Image: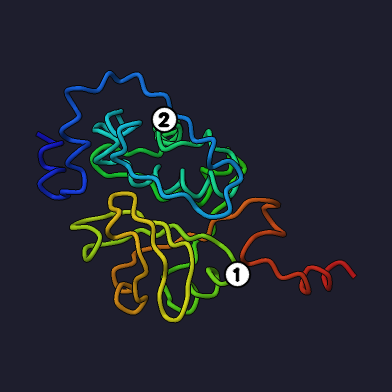
Amino acid sequence: VELVNLYNKNPEAQEFVLSFYTENYSHNIDLHQYDYCSSIPHFIQWDCRWGYESYNGNYLALTGCGPTCLSMVAVYLTGDSTYSPLWMANFLDEHGYAIENVGTAWSIFDDGVQCIDLYGYNIGTQKDTIISYLMSGYPVICSMGPGDFTDDGHFVVITGYNDGCVSILDPNSNIRSKDWKLEDINDQMVSCWAMYVGNQITDSPDYCEENVSESVV
């Protein structure tokens, strides 16, 4: 029933839904083509390689937008393609970040990802702030409220900004993965996290080298 509802809401997932009875569930997930990739890969939560697996009490295809977004960012920032959506879903489940009947806990983006040497910084939803971090090269994971992307709640990845538009990778849609005018969707944004790797302090979006230098003189 859940997969039928997925198809009714998202015709893009037709092949995934119709393949349910023919899948053998022995998925060989090889994402090595994304090792040290130059741009953020686009992963879909209802990909047959992982979408039939369980996450948060349901199919990853239905509830896995959080781990799928985190997978995209982790693979890009770390260069490690083993961080597939299924790996990330299992990681979130095992560490208590998957809250049944609620969704993926926001705290995973702030501190939970430090277990894999990834860091997140909550930047709010002000347009100028989002633009600033995107222009500085930080990918942004965004929690979206009702609107163009969801009827209730959903995570997407914002990969860049240009001329009033943000580039979005939607883990639930190829069609919606495109450039959007920031002013058209800004009021649908609930919270945003700039993601990064490296030194937790000196590579953090709020680090100011001049202030640090002055404090140690």
> Residue 134 placed where, x, y %?
53, 68
Viewer-side residue, 158 vs 179: 179
Question: Closer to the observer: label 2 or label 1?
Answer: 1
Q: Residue furthest right?
A: 217
Task: State which quarter of the image contains the N terminus.
Answer: top left
User: What residue did someone put label 2 on?
Assistant: 90
**Left or right for 189, reference 10:** right
Q: Secondary structure at mark 1?
A: loop
> Residue 39 placed where, x, y %?
53, 55
Q: Residues within 10 Å of mark 1 (few under 14, many from 20)?
A: few
Under mark 1, the amino acid is: Ser
Q: Residue at x 47, y 72 (%)?
A: 161
Q: Residue at x 32, y 42 (%)?
A: 45
Res. 136 mark: 1
> Residue 172 placed where, x, y %?
28, 49
Above or below, 160 relative to 4: below
Q: Residues within 10 Å of mark 2 (few under 14, many from 20)?
A: some
Under mark 2, the amino acid is: Asn
Residue 217 placement: quadrant: bottom right
Above or below, 6 relative to 164: above
> Residue 24 placed where, x, y %?
27, 18
